Amino acid sequence: MHPLSSLKRHAISGFTIVELVVVITVVGILAAGAATFIRNPTQAYFDVENYANLTDRADTALRRISREMRNALPNSVRATTNGADSFIEFIPVTAAGRYRAEVGNNAADNPLDFSLSADSFDVLGAPVNVSGGSQLVIYNLGVSGADAYESTNRRALTTTGTLSALAFTGGQFPQPSPSSRFYVVATATTFACDLTNRRLMMYSGYAIQSAQPASIGALNALATGRQIAANVSSCQMQYIPGALQRSGIVLIYLGLTQDAARVNLMQQVNIVNSP
């Protein structure tokens, strides 16, 4: 066989440029069509993943707020707004119990005397734990003359440790508790909707203020905030006092976004205000 004939046959059996362009075009069209079918399910998967993640984060944040606020001193919850930001403040209770109101069968009984500006009294029931800087609150109604924020019924405790008797100074208590209840407190806590930075913040451990801190700047001056939730798209907190101030409701609306996913949750926290 002649060598030129063999080369000619190989040349005839190859691809032309036109054929290669056609093949590439067809493959590109098929790939684009396949990508369309793959993209939508893939995007749906990521949307569901983001939605589940946002729901879990929002639910965790709302549960945290609920858990903290259920430990609020009766009638200490107060709320305010500043533009798009909203704030809810309360005084956490660190210990509570009942004080001895009168002498019983034992001559050593030590009741609380409301006529004295400094006194000691027996704790009825289990001993309570008192740390340094704690204060005693009795019959907090959240109104002038019986408001822990204005310190009319808040006194400095002079004893610390695990105690069966408490001692205080700072003046007479304005009125006794009908149920002989007392509360031990130390600091205040605020949850803040910071929509400027799209986050939900918690400020705690700062000294009790007579006027509620009503801005992120004011809170930053009092304590270091902790982020409870990020990517906040909407946030609002309200407090609705109950009838006769025996109960109240905190309403929290929280919305989070991530990419195309968005969740909006609402939480209702029941506040027991029986002092």
Image (cartoon, rainbow, N blue to C red):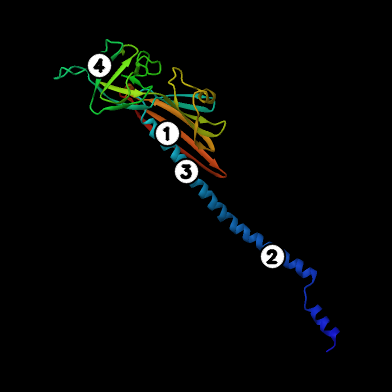
Image height of 160 relative to 256, above or below:
above
Residue 122 lies in what quarter of the image? top left
Mark 3 residue type: Thr
Q: Earlier in the sequence, mark 2 or mark 1?
A: 2
> Dots 4 and 1: beta carbons under 8 Å?
no
- Give the CA distance from mark 3 to mark 2: 42 Å
What residue would you read off at disc 4? 112
Residue at 47 percent of width and 39 percent of height = 58
Q: Nearer the viewer, residue 163 or 138?
A: 163
- Give the CA distance from mark 2 to mark 1: 56 Å
- Give the CA distance from mark 4 to mark 2: 91 Å
Q: Nearer the viewer, mark 3 or mark 1?
A: 1
Q: Residues within 10 Å of mark 1 (few under 14, many from 20)?
A: some
Relative to 199, is 166 on the left or the right? left
Mark 2 residue type: Val
Q: Earlier in the sequence, mark 3 or mark 1?
A: 3
